[in-house]
Image: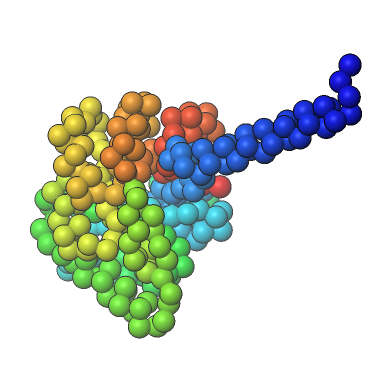
Amino acid sequence: MMNRRDKAYIWRRMGILLVLLGCATLIVSASNPNTPEGFLIIAHRGASGHEPENTMAAFEEAERLGSDFIEFDVQFSKDKELVVIHDDTVDRTTDHQGDVDDYTLDELERMDAPAGNGESQAEKEKIVSLEEVLDRFAGKMAMLIEIKDSKRYPGIEEQVAEVVNEYERRLDTSGFAGQRAMTGGMERKNSAGIIIQSYDFESTRLMHNLLPNVPIAALIHEDKHPLTDATLDALVSFSAYIHYPKELLDEQIVERIHERGRKVIAWTIQNDEDMVKMKKLGVDGVITDYPG
């Protein structure tokens, strides 16, 4: 039989082993890029499953639900103002018809925009400008801005950059401390909390050159899938995030992007089943109509 000293020795060894195992678990969790810590919830066109898409109501609902980002689209109006709307026409989301750039900003703002995916019975929502959204959220909530159809709107990248730079200057002048956006291993000063994305890789490359302190996301369309190593290497030279359709994602794609030190965001997630699947794949966040 073991004496008391032998038993005490065994229990001490077991205790040390348990402590070491606990520390190892913490180290793996902290260093593994695929763990859900810091998992981003990005509200697609705002909380567009609850309120009319790309409206202030949708953005404020996303904020109320605790989203990390609001995502929205920008296009040019007839008078070359940046307006927040997804389609290149106003037919689906307003009580008018015609191309967005057939109307001035003033005309667009006077339209009723209650349509879209939202469940709300809002009596009156309107199309808003990029500056209105920045006035409300810059420095308070992170924003993912998508540049739509850049070939249709020559000069839109330069104008977006000009507006974003202006808000960065305002926040710096006001003494706002700024926030740090972790972007695939790079830490960039980004006071307004902005990421910019586009399907057009040349547009995103240009935005990176115009706004080197603002993280850029390459938005992957299904016709670009699968990405070759050469294409992926080119993308990560100017993109901190790769935003991928959920239907096309698998562990290999996520691993290839993570190996290059970049983040993977899956779109568009609409239910718990897809959310669980994306987390298992190790993505770094999701774009969803139903944040919260």
- Where residue 154 sits, quadrant-wise, is bottom left
Q: Residue at x 43, y 40 (%)?
A: 33
| Position above or below: 242 against 206 | above
- Where residue 262 sits, quadrant-wise, is top left
| Position above or below: 258 against 280 | below
Would residue 109 be seen by someone viewing this image from the given angle? no
| Position above or below: 205 against 31 | below
Residue 234 percent across, percent down from the top left: 16, 42
In the image, 123 versus 140, the foreground residue is 140
Q: Residue at x 13, y 49 (%)?
A: 202
- Tell how many labels: 0
Residue 82 percent across, percent down from the top left: 24, 64
Q: Residue furthest top?
A: 1
Q: Residue at x 20, y 50 (%)?
A: 238
Q: Is residue 230 left or right of residue 4?
A: left
Residue 122 percent across, percent down from the top left: 51, 56
In the image, 112 versus 172, the foreground residue is 172
- On-image quarter of the N terminus: top right
| Position above or below: 239 against 179 | above
Would residue 9 be seen by someone viewing this image from the given angle? yes
| Coloring basis for residues | rainbow
- Where residue 252 sits, quadrant-wise, is top left
In the image, 249 versus 95, the foreground residue is 249
Residue 97 percent across, percent down from the top left: 26, 52
In the image, 239 versus 41, the foreground residue is 239
Q: Residue at x 51, y 59 (%)?
A: 63
Q: Is residue 29 left or right of residue 246?
A: right
